[in-house]
Each structure stands twice: as structure tokens, then as C-alpha cells.
Amino acid sequence: MKKMYFIFLLMIVACTSDELQIEPVVVKDTFEAVENTVSDKGAITFTLEKEGIYTLTLLDGNQVVSREKFVGKQGRNSLTLYTRTLQTKYLYLVLQDSNNNQIGKTTIIIK
């Protein structure tokens, strides 16, 4: 009889549903913050109002460290920063459109 109760209890516990709670991932816009910390192969995300050619520039003071042109899409965009070879720890990250209008600027701290 004790075995029957044990099996019955085991069936009740085993038949309960497992609830999996998934929390939404919040992706912050890189250019909304004054400072951002990045590591090698770190992703930066930003929102563009329209599709077009954009330039992303890394500056050490007024000196250009790196410059990349890319085709941006309307809405959320994400790019990867490769920082392993950079010697400077504090840089400016500037986003410009094809007319050289500054869309965003932030300071990045390299880990």
C-alpha cells in the first residue's frame, strides 16, 4: 500500500507542467549613453531613421584611428568592434551620414 501512495505521489509531481519564464533582452542604443565600455568583438547597436551609406569613425582626440563606411538600414543596426589591436583605452565613436552630418557621438572605454 505504501508503494501505491509513493507511485501516486510520484505521478502527481511528475505530471506538473514546468513553467519557463523568458525575460526580454533589452538592447541599448550605443549613442544614447555618454560613455560605453566595449571589449574585442563587442557589438554596438544604434537606430537609423533611413537607409543609406554611413560612416563610423574612431577618434583619439582629433586623430582618426579607424574609419568604416557601411550601408545602414532603417531601424536597428548592429556592428562589431574589433579592439584587440588598439592601444588607446579611451576613444570617441562618431556616426555620420553620407553628407557628413553627425548623427551620434559617444566615448568608448576599451576593456
Image (tube, rainbow, N blue to C red):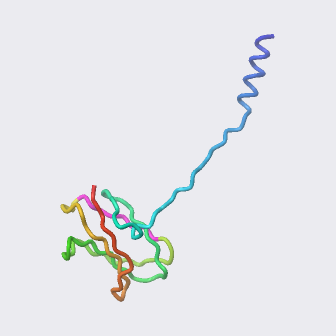
**Residue 14 x, y percent position in the rendering:** 71, 29
Residue 36 on the magenta span: no
Q: In terms of depth relative to the viewer, which is nearer, 27 or 3?
A: 27
Q: Quadrant of the C terminus?
A: bottom left
Quarter of the image for residue 46 reads bottom left
Q: Residue at x 44, y 67 (%)?
A: 29
Q: Residue at x 24, y 63 (%)?
A: 90
Q: Residue at x 38, y 83 (%)?
A: 97
Q: What range of the chain is rendered magenta? A: 77-84
Quarter of the image for residue 93 reads bottom left
* Vertical side of 71 occupied by 26: above or below: above
* Vertical side of 15 occupied by 102: above or below: below
Q: Quadrant of the N terminus?
A: top right
16 sits left or right of 63 in the view:
right
**Residue 51 x, y percent position in the rendering:** 47, 82
**Residue 73 x, y percent position in the rendering:** 47, 77
18 sits left or right of 4 in the view:
left
Toward the front, the furthest residue is 34
Residue 82 on the magenta span: yes
Magenta stretch secondary structure, dominant? strand
Quarter of the image for residue 87 reads bottom left
**Residue 108 x, y percent position in the rendering:** 30, 64
Q: In terms of depth relative to the viewer, which is nearer, 47 or 1?
A: 47
